[in-house]
Amino acid sequence: MPETLALMRPFLAVAEAGSISRGAAKLAMSQPALTKAVQRLERELGVSLFERRARGVVPTRFGEVLLRHAKLIEAEWSFARAEIEATREGHVGSLRVAGGPYFGVALLPGAIAGLHREYPQLRIDLEIGVNALTLPKLLAGDLDMVVGRLPVGTELPAFLMREAIADVRVDVIAGHDHPLAGKRRVGAALADFPWVVYQEDHETIAKMVALVGRLSGKPPRVVVEATSLIAVAQLLRAGPYLSCLARGLLSTPFGQGIVALDAGAPVARFDAGAMVPRTLANVAPVRRLIALLRDGAHAANPKP
């Protein structure tokens, strides 16, 4: 690793361990050598990176800024090595990806399988969750990519870029044997049946409550809040429940036995895509995964 980049490892070890001694043990080096490495980085940057506390050290304001970028630099370095290694014996490295409920079920599995056909040695760490849970990890450098609802009305930090991939429509859904299945304009009856919702998606739940109130004049009766999308689907198949999920899920095995209802309007509609640090935007596995996701979205929702 180039000399300047080599100083990032001692810094990261101390920041993550919270002390010089534990950081030295993690890197199998002496405490004086680790201290000198951190001091050298501080001299190069002209700032103090750590503040001493009774039980160790914590990053200063400057250290917190460097910590976020150091994690990204380390990830980019691993990708650079992966591409160089690929010219010899195949791709190596890792990619930490998080996907929203729609991408995690409908698009990411197929895209990751396609990516592995081209990068068979690439390790993928996959997390499924809504933006409220995954974006903070991306901002902290603990994820390399988040694929989901693109933020509206709030600016992403300058070090992140976004790429639109799909237009996602969220509809009221039910089991195919539900009394409202196949009927026209069922909005007035939406408050007459029990609802099951995906607990983590607070934004969609709020829009569902507003839609049901507007169409039926009454609030929905939510009887189950689940942290599992699979549990939501199973409940819809098993009883007279209603829910709201991305319409694209219905064309996957996940959506077997589930149908969208004609409520007269979608619960929500939004642009979804990839959010990735600009430092990783041109890394080959990242670019290829975005392309595969876009191909999958187009196949699932072809334009007329």
Image (tube, rainbow, N blue to C red):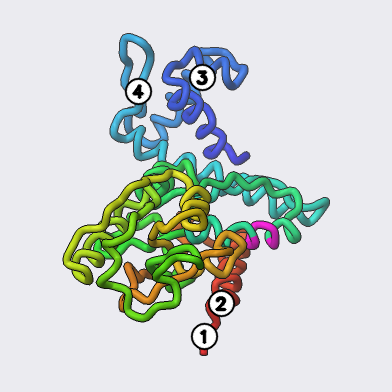
Q: Nearer the viewer, mark 2 or mark 4?
A: 2
Which residue lies under the disc numbered 1?
A: 303
Tell me what residue is drawn at x 72 percent, y 56 percent: 116
The residue labelled by disc 3 is 23
What amino acid does circle 3 point to? Gly
Tell which circle, 4 or 1, labels the residue nearer the N-terminal end: 4
The residue singled out by tag 4 in the image is 58
Type of the residue with mark 4: Val
Which residue was labeled with disc 2?
Answer: 298
Contact between labelled residues 1 and 2, with CB atoms less than 8 Å apart: yes
Q: Distance between the Cα atoms at labels 2 and 4?
A: 47 Å
| Distance between the alpha carbons at the discs numbered 4 and 1 | 52 Å
Horizontal and vertical percent for residue 195? 35, 55
**Nearer-N-terminus badge (1/3):** 3
Question: Disc 1 marks which amino acid?
Answer: Lys
Q: Is residue 26 above or below residue 134?
A: above
Where does the image place residue 48, in percent across and percent down from the top left? 33, 28
Contact check, label 3 and label 2, Cβ < 8 Å: no
Q: Is residue 163 left or right of residue 205?
A: right
- Judging depth in this view, the residue of 40 and 290 nearest the camera is 290
Mark 3 / mark 2, whichever is N-terminal: 3
Q: Residues within 10 Å of mark 3 (few under 14, many from 20)?
A: many
Give the secondary structure at mark 1.
loop
Q: Is 247 part of what is drawn in magenta? A: no
Three-letter amino acid code at the position of disc 2 = His
Whether label 1 touches label 3, CB < 8 Å: no
Q: Magenta residues, as a range?
A: 110-114
Q: Main secondary structure of the magenta part?
A: helix
